[in-house]
């Protein structure tokens, strides 16, 4: 079983607008509300792949109940821990090929609620073979909180795919029990190393050879429409993807994570699950609904992706 963790979930509302006007009324004919948060997007795509997945994390209030109902309606298994404060809302305004986001910071969690979550997660991990951790931490959780989850997974020999950023990611890559796979972008790699920027693939390759990343088995650096650059042990790969028409990019990175997690779960070769991940990211970008993929187009895209070793 795959367990996905979303510590700071949300109700994601998207407003597609022909034009976005500031300081006046904007009317939207179609608003989409879904159970959101990066880990729940991962869960949704894994469920569409028919992979066994259970979503967990923290939920509270009426918005938390909405998320449970939304997941139940789609048949996704979940086992959330309850918190006292209300789960957050996040809004995405889609206009003129652009995306403007308004993200609430979310609830403040107590130490007792985190302890209760640990107990619930320990039960889930008894049957898990892969753990996926995505997104930001709620207020009240320490910056290095994910390290505690890495320790729990390590004790059970469960590989962890970690998709987060900032101080939480830095704490994780510096931790003794590091994740099996991380998925930063080039800007985040530069931030982790304390350098201004990374402008080309040569610099990116050199950066990934830093001592900081030495013991992380797989690092998938997202390059957006240019695919990805990957470090796997001591080898490097460039993943090239075809150009596509993007309808809604929200959740494409999470769909890519779902492909990585699925590949690890099925013990697929690296090149195979890199292609799977890229395909799922592209398929999500072509759909209006976040965390949704049309698998009818899977094989067509898969054949167009090239994974080349970089010497």
Image (cartoon, grey):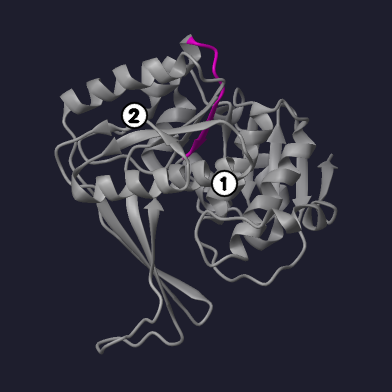
Q: Nearer the viewer, mark 1 or mark 2?
A: 1
- SS of the residue at dot 1? helix
- Disc 1 from disc 2: Cα separation: 28 Å
Measured as percent of width and height from the top left, residue 160 is found at 53, 26
Residue situated in front as seen by the camera: 167 or 94: 94
Can you identify the residue that label 2 sits on? 144
Residue depicted at 63% across the width and 54% down the height: 281
Q: Residue at x 20, y 45 (%)?
A: 107
Label 2 Cα crowd, 10 Å radius (few <14 / some 14-19 / many 20+): some
Start and end of the magenta stretch?
A: 156-163
Q: 292 or 229: nearer the eye?
A: 292
Residue 182 in view here: yes
The residue that label 1 is drawn on is: 45
Does the magenta portion include 157?
Answer: yes
Up the image or down, 92 lies above or below 151; here it is below
| Residue 61 percent coordinates (x, y) | 18, 45
């Amino acid at each position: 079983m795959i367990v996905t963790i979303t510590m700071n979930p949300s109700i994601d509302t998207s407003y597609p607008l022909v034009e976005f006007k500031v300081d006046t009324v904007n009317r939207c004919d179609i608003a989409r509300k879904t159970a959101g948060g990066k880990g729940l997007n991962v869960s949704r795509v894994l469920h569409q792949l028919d992979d066994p997945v259970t979503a967990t994390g923290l939920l509270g209030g009426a918005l938390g109940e909405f998320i449970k109902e939304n997941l139940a309606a789609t048949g996704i298994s979940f086992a959330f821990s309850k918190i006292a404060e209300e789960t957050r809302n996040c809004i995405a305004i889609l206009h003129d090929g652009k995306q403007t986001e308004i993200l609430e910071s979310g609830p403040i969690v107590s130490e007792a609620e985190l302890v209760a979550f640990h107990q619930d997660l320990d039960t889930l991990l008894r049957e898990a073979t892969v753990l996926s951790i995505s997104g930001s931490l709620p207020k009240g959780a320490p910056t290095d909180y994910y390290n505690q989850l890495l320790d729990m997974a390590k004790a059970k020999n469960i590989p962890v795919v970690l998709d987060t950023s900032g101080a939480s990611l830095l704490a994780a890559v510096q931790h003794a029990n590091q994740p099996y796979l991380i998925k930063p972008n080039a800007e985040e790699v530069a931030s982790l190393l304390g350098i201004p920027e990374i402008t080309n693939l040569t610099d990116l390759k050199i950066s990934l050879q830093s001592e900081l990343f030495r013991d992380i088995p797989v690092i998938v650096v997202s390059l957006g429409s240019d695919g990805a650059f990957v470090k796997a042990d001591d080898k490097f790969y460039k993943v090239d993807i075809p150009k596509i028409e993007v309808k809604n990019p929200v959740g494409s990175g999470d769909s890519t994570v779902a492909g990585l997690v699925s590949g690890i779960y099925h013990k697929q070769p690296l090149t195979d699950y890199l292609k799977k991940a890229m395909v799922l990211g592209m398929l999500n970008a072509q759909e209006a609904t976040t965390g949704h993929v049309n698998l009818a187009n899977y094989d067509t895209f898969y054949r167009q992706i090239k994974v080349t070793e970089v010497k």
